[in-house]
Amino acid sequence: MGPDANIDDFRQLVLARGRELYRDLPWRRTRDPYAIWLSEVMLQQTQVTRVDGRWQRWLMRFPTVDALAEAEVADVLEEWQGMGYNRRALALRNAARAVMDGGGELPRDERDLVALPGIGPATAAGIRAFAFNLPATYLETNVRTVFLHELFSDAEDVPDSAIVPLVRDTCPADASDPADDPRTWYYALLDYGAHLKRTVPNPSRRSRTHVRQSRFEGSHRQKRAEVVRLLLEAHQLGMGLDEGAVLDGIARAEAAAGRPAPDPCELLAILDELVAEGFCRMQDGAWYV
């Protein structure tokens, strides 16, 4: 379409493609704010195929905000294993506690949502649109892809500041038309964006925000995840791990991957990070989840 396209034409195109490409995903069959919040967190930098199945399993184990708020850190981290970014799981549990402290209802107001641990503007907008059918400025990667492809087709290094007003202004202001309400509109953008990523050179590369994801294997983040995994294994046996056990466990994992033994100082720094962030605690010379 290009930057001079008529916005009404753009909206009609997106809605038509949304009807054609609609994905009947399990989290679209609910209006439960907690379940939708969970899907938004799980879908961050994670493929839909990985989330489908894990989302259902999580809800079987922690079916309500109250159940999650009361859960032990070890149980939450255990259920999250394999999803990546363990901080998300811990933030979910901490936010659930904050919600329960505030009366037990997930707020609708964007300012109140982003005040919760782990909820940024995009997640808050997703909750508003999909759980409450309220207007929101929901800018995530698939949504950005559609705007770049249709309205910035010849532009490079496009800043989000140029896209955000369009995202805000094209979202329906109310839910009076079930064929064109905030929920339907953003599903259409998501599904059309996912289709574009499969069928054309990724338009997101023309976004100023585009960065190539850093290598996970051998990274600091990978070692953090391995330390958490070791601590969870020890927790299942009713024990903690001392410094030597952690160093030996990580060394074995690195050797199995064909990498050299890790720097002990880095691992001790990781343990300090995990304690400070609430992943684990140190007691009598050992670390426990």
Image (cartoon, grey):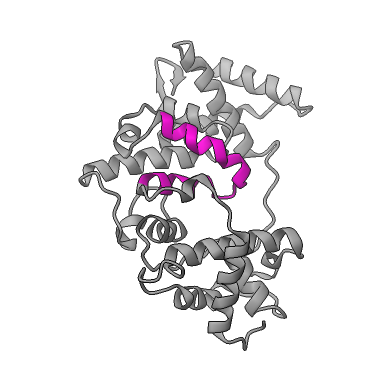
Q: Is residue 220 left or right of residue 234?
A: right
Residue 162 among magenta residues: no
State the extent of the magenta-drawn residues as a range: 34-60
221 versus 281 height, above or below: below
Q: Residue furthest left?
A: 103
Q: Between 133 and 266, which is closer to the camera in this rendering? A: 133
Residue at horizontal 22 percent and vertical 47 percent from the top: 102
96 versus 23 height, above or below: above
Residue 204 lies in quadrant = bottom right
Residue 134 drawn at (x, y percent) = 36, 65
Residue at horizontal 45 percent and vertical 78 percent from the top: 169
Q: Residue furthest right?
A: 258
Image quadrant for the N terminus?
bottom right
Residue 281 drawn at (x, y percent) = 40, 25
Residue at horizontal 49 percent and vertical 26 percent from the top: 78
Residue 55 among magenta residues: yes
- Whether residue 10 is visible: yes
Residue 264 lies in quadrant = top right
Dominant secondary structure, magenta: helix
